[in-house]
Amino acid sequence: GAGVSQSPSNKVTEKGKDVELRCDPISGHTALYWYRQSLGQGLEFLIYFQGNSAPDKSGLPSDRFSAERTGGSVSTLTIQRTQQEDSAVYLCASSPQAGGFTDTQYFGPGTRLTVL
Amino acid sequence: AQTVTQSQPEMSVQEAETVTLSCTYDTSESDYYLFWYKQPPSRQMILVIRQEAYKQQNATENRFSVNFQKAAKSFSLKISDSQLGDAAMYFCAYRGAAGNKLTFGGGTRVLVKP
C-alpha cells in the first residue's frame, strides 16, 4: 500500500512568512508524528497525535509552531513568522497504534524548508 | 530524559565486508524498544531492525543484526556482506514502552567502497 506522503517536497520562503506543511499518513494508522531534522539539533520530536485524544505538543519549540489533524487522517504543520533557524527537514511518521511493539513508526520523505 | 549516543560520525566499509555501528543509550525505564533506521539521500527514514528490551535474543533481519546488551545499555548494528545500497545515514532510536516519541542518536554515515 501507499506509504506516508508529504508535501511540498521542498519549500523556500522569506523570513516572516507563514508556511504550511502537509502529511498524509498510511491509511488506517491512528498515530501521527512530526519530527524536525536540522544540522545543529539533529532529529527532534515536535508533536504527536493519537486518534481523538489531545495531541502531545511537548516538542514544539515555540508558539509560532502549531499542528492539526483533520478527521484523524491528514495533518498540517504550520509555522508562523518563519525565522532562519526554522530551516530544516520536517519529517512526518505514522504508526498503526500508540504503544506496544507494533507501534513502529513509518516515515515520509520529508519537507525541506529553507527560510531566506 | 532519555539520551541516545552514536559515537561514530562516519564509518567506511569495503563492499562485501562487515561493519558494526555503535549505539549507547541512557534510561531509567526497564521496558522499552530500540530501533535502527536508515536514511539514504532521498531523506526517507527506513526501518532496518527493531528490538524489544525484554527479549534477550538479538534481532536479525537478513544481513542486519544487532548486539543488544541491556546491562551495558548498548545496541550495536552489524551489517554483513555490505552492499553499495547500504550507503546511508544510520540512526539509532529509543522509545519507552509507555511513550510515543522516538529519541534519536546523532547518526552514523556509512560509506561503502566498491
Image: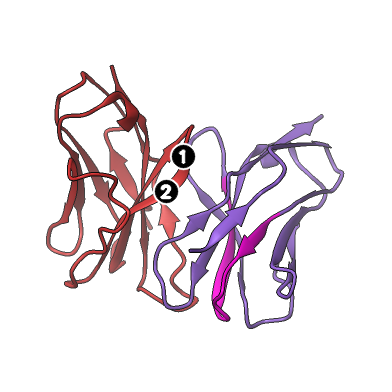
**Corner quadrant of residue B60:** bottom right
Q: Is residue B91 above or below residue B114?
A: below
Q: Provide the secondary structure element on which disc 1 rests.
A: loop
User: Which residue type does callout 2 highlight?
Assistant: Glu
Mark 1 crowdedness (10 Å alpha carbons): few <14, some 14-19, many ≥20: few
Q: Is residue B73 left or right of residue A65?
A: right
Q: Which residue is mark 2?
A: A44
The residue lying at 79 percent from left, 44 percent from top is: B82
- The number of callouts visible is 2
Q: Is residue A54 magenta?
A: no
Residue range (magenta): B23-38
> Which chain can be seen in purple?
B
Q: Is residue B32 magenta?
A: yes
Residue B94 in the image: state x and y as whole percent.
54, 63
> CA–CA distance between discs 2 and 1?
7 Å
The residue lying at 54 percent from left, 75 percent from top is: B32
The residue lying at 74 percent from left, 69 percent from top is: B72
Marks 2 and 1: CB-CB under 8 Å?
A: yes
